[in-house]
Image (cartoon, helix red, strand yellow):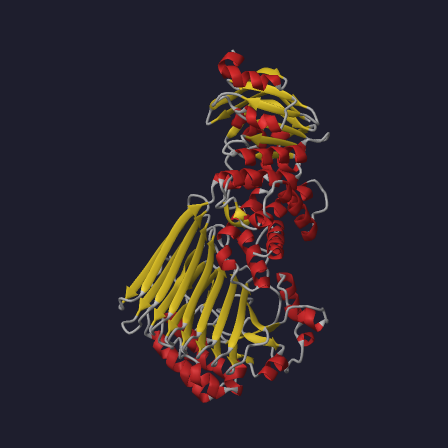
Amino acid sequence: MNEEIALRDAAAIEAAARVAEYEHGWSAEIEQEFAPKGLNEDTVRFISAKKNEPEWMLDWRLKAWRHWLTMPMPDWAKLAVPPIDYQNAYYYAAPRPKKELASLDEVDPEILRVYERLGIPLEEQKVLAGVEGARRVAVDAVFDSVSVATTFRKELEAAGVIFRSMSEAIREYPELVRRWLGKVVPCHDNFFAALNCAVFSDGTFVYVPEGVRCPMELSTYFRINAQNTGQFERTLIVADKGAYVSYLEGCTAPQRDENQLHAAVVELVALDDAEIKYSTVQNWYPGDAQGRGGIYNFVTKRALCQGRRSKVSWTQVETGSAITWKYPSCVLNGEDSVGEFYSVAVTNNRQQADTGTKMIHNARGTRSTIVSKGISAGHSSNTYRGLVRVGAAADGVRNFTQCDSLLLGHDCGAHTVPYIEVRNPSAQIEHEATTSKISDDQLFYAMSRGLSQEAAVALIVNGFAKEVLQQLPMEFAVEAQKLLGISLEGSVG
Amino acid sequence: MLKIHNLHATVADKPILKGLSLTINAGEIHAIMGPNGAGKSTLGYTLAGRPGYEVTEGAAQLNGVDLLALAPHERAAAGLFLGFQYPVEIPGVSFLQFLREAANAQRLGRGEPTLSGGAFLKLAREKAALLQMDMEMLKRPVNVGFSGGEKKRAEMVQMGILDPALAILDETDSGLDIDALRICGEGINAIMRRPDKAVLLITHYQRLLDVVRPDFVHVLSGGRIVRSGGPELALELEEQGYEAVAA
């Protein structure tokens, strides 16, 4: 590792030690336009109409809606989910409509202030201010449900990259959207995916054309801001032959007493020789120490490695949410395609996480790597659930899985549930799992060198999660390190 | 510099230190020797504030500061360094990251400005060279995969970087071959043999004391110091054994 990176790592952890509590628990006052409370066919029609969607989109939503009605909520995860009253929530909230925005200056200052208070590095601001060397990140800011600002559009357009809110993409690129939407995660895939298909409010669409390396990292910040507003984001990223794109998704949410449902769907498609890197730092409100409040996060994320030698890499750092149900997966249909999953999941207090991945090897020579780091503290429960499946026709498949659990304290739980289904004898599958605790020896050693207990815990935990953190783009890695420290404060001693 | 008065300490309710008193002045190097179970390591851990080492009576001051009232990291900031007999591994955290964070935490604790990245690296390079340790080693995770000798040398590099007023070195010589012993010993001299610093060496053997020459030697037995003398006392112990000398 290079020295400077080591030092920046250290600087990030320093910052973490200074932050005391979950800082993002407040809500900004921005006027919302709500769909009526409750969920029925009219809600679906309201959302579609509100977004000026074409007929086919409404039909698609209605079909999903009708299917959802027939589905039971899944209960196989190791999660205790309180009953969710789907009628007692709003399914659409938008900042008041404004005309097209040309720059961030036109964004509601209240929204910009929200980001500022979150401490999210809106690199965009630096670039606009002419700060030299500012990292270029295109931000499609999703504030609650509707994109209020899309920037860097021109430069992306010059490269041929389409980066739009999903609503815009449906209007402007209907063929492209129609060709791929629901092809990776079909509407009938699962309960939450079906719900998302019916009522998704907005999200992001990215298309990188053949042979294009996306000139900047794409980033969307999600926030749940309206009380009782379920968030149903829909993201679709298509990398055409030989294309490359790196996408960053980061989330924080303000503090609320009532539980908020979030059921996003993310679909990725990689054609021949294409590569998609998808990174997430998730810091939604986890509820208080007694388990009151917090986000329910039921997400379906899946990638189709459709092309030969295509590659998709999921990296996630999950510290928030009261309940996390999330399995970013890769369907490896292209010969010699590669799927990767790097995950850090932290649970503290009463948080519950059941998260992992699925690597479906359908073609010869496909390879996958899974590195999962679970960190449990307080009274939390943290489960890794992963499937590695090798089809009969898939010769020469390789998989390596490593699942490590770190326990803090005596009242938390860590579980590893690997499913391995191999129908081809040539497959090489490796699975390693460890469970460890932060030892008193480690803590005292670090403290005897001058680190406070909390700084010592943050340091040791970041070391444990390092293999995953180093997969993240730099500014995300810094944010993630801070989060790990913050989310575990007070969990030892 | 260090004033220990009538120190009593228990580990798991078992009394280990039973009225230990010791004064170390700035510029001095003291060696504590004694049989296994005499309480040598307990003294180091107790002064450094290890949880589970409970002081039941007595006092310990470092440059006038009541050590016993401080948390371990505050004792470090106050100028205390403990060289571990068995240094601990921290996977995934590089020595450089670990030490820069520790050094700056200490500085902040003392109200001093923190070290810039460049200044820290310069310091680290200098101290690593002193202990003949490759800088590459310091980019590796703390003590992971290090040999016994490398761990001890790394402890001395840490001491050099953290720049304590008082170092308590718990059997730094154990597990060292002759060359490593000389390198560590010379490192201790270079870093700590100064008018404003002091060292307490905990050791069983004369061989470290041939390199780091102590000004005073104490024999610890049964939880208290039973005899004190000059460097010649160590030679006497080497010849006659603890029982004869401590009796």
Q: Residue at x 50, y 78 (%)?
A: A243
Q: Is residue A381 visible?
A: no
Choose top left, top right, bottom left or bottom right for residue A165: bottom right
- Quadrant for the N terminus of chain B, please: top right
Percent x, y of residue A88: 45, 68
Taking depth in this image into account, of A278 and B12 the one nearest to the observer is: A278
> How far across and how far down the image is residue A467, in percent?
49, 57
The spot of residue A14 in percent (x, y) is 62, 50
The residue shown at (65%, 64%) is A116
Residue farthest front in this picture: B179
Q: In which image quadrant can residue B20 be found?
A: top right
Q: Residue at x 51, y 55 (%)?
A: A466
Asked whether A179 or B205 is in front, the reply is: B205
- Foreground of the two, A36 or B207: B207
Relative to A163, say whether A451 is above or below. above
Asked if residue A420 lies left or right of residue A155, the reply is left
Left-right relation of A381 to A482: left
Residue B181 locus on image (x, y percent) = 56, 33
- Total marks drawn? 0
User: B230 or A308: nearer the eye?
Assistant: B230
Residue A399 visible here: yes
